[in-house]
Image (cartoon, grey):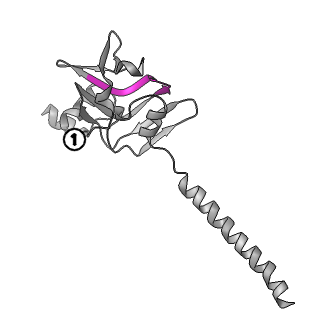
């Protein structure tokens, strides 16, 4: 008679423990995707943003914000400049309303307004800088690149009006 009372209790305890462990495993295994995974899910190459991006937000409409520790430059076929904050609207194969990325062509920097992959099999990605679009090899953007922080990249961000100037550096530049 005591065994009959104990067995249902053990069964319920075992069931409860199993339930808790399953819930913990499910919540632990469902981590948030990285910005690189989100790019790939949207038909874009993972290397559009530099290595190490961990702070970002994306809403249901595709509007995103990427926060870098500092403005920096990355070398592809040409050089790209990333401001500390990059934002835009992501749809499949396209980023429009883009702010915070500039592309260097010859010796000039151009604000990138839109990026798109027209036909993935073409192997091309396009950067719209307003007046003209520049095409690059899609394979150049397969993996995130290292991004170098330099004094020049900070100056570029300021000249483009996208970061707050450091008043000490500004006064040194005037002197």
Q: Residue at x 30, y 28 (%)?
A: 139
Magenta stretch: dominant SS? strand
9 versus 82 height, above or below:
below
Residue 101, placed above or below residue 36: above
Q: How many marks?
A: 1
Quadrant in which the N terminus appears: bottom right
- In this orientation, does residue 115 appear? no
**Residue 92 in picture, x, y percent from top left:** 50, 25
Q: Is residue 72 left or right of residue 16?
A: left
Q: Find residue 97 and report its horizontal and vertical position in percent.
A: 45, 22
- Is 16 situated left or right of 58 in this image? right
Q: Which of these two is toward me, 134 or 156?
A: 134
Instruction: Please identify the residue farthest to the top as the structure is shown.
Output: 131
128 vs 77, left or right, is right
Residue ID at (41%, 39%):
36
In which image quadrant can residue 123 be found? top left
Q: Nearer the viewer, residue 79 or 76?
A: 76
Q: Magenta part of the protein: which range?
A: 89-103
**Magenta includes 140?**
no
**Residue 98 vs residue 62: left or right?**
left
Q: Position of residue 51 (x, y in %)?
A: 32, 42
- Quarter location, residue 110: top left
Q: Furthest residue to the right?
A: 1
Q: Hey, which residue is sitting farthest bottom in the picture?
A: 2
């Amino acid at each position: 008679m005591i065994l009959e009372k104990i067995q249902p209790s053990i069964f319920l305890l075992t069931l409860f423990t199993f339930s808790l462990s399953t819930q913990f495993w499910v919540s632990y295994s469902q981590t948030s995707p990285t910005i690189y995974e989100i790019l790939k899910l949207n038909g874009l190459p993972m290397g559009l943003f530099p290595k190490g991006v961990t702070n970002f937000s994306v809403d249901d409409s595709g509007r995103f914000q990427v926060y870098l520790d500092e403005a920096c430059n990355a070398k592809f076929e040409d050089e790209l400049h990333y401001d500390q904050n990059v934002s835009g609207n992501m749809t499949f194969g396209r980023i429009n309303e883009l702010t915070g990325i500039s592309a260097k062509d010859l010796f000039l920097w151009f604000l990138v307004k839109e990026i798109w992959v027209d036909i993935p099999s073409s192997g091309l990605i396009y950067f719209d800088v307003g007046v003209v679009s520049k095409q690059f090899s899609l394979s150049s953007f397969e993996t995130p690149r290292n991004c170098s922080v330099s004094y020049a990249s900070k100056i570029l961000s300021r000249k483009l009006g996208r970061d707050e100037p450091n008043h000490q550096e500004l006064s040194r530049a005037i002197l």
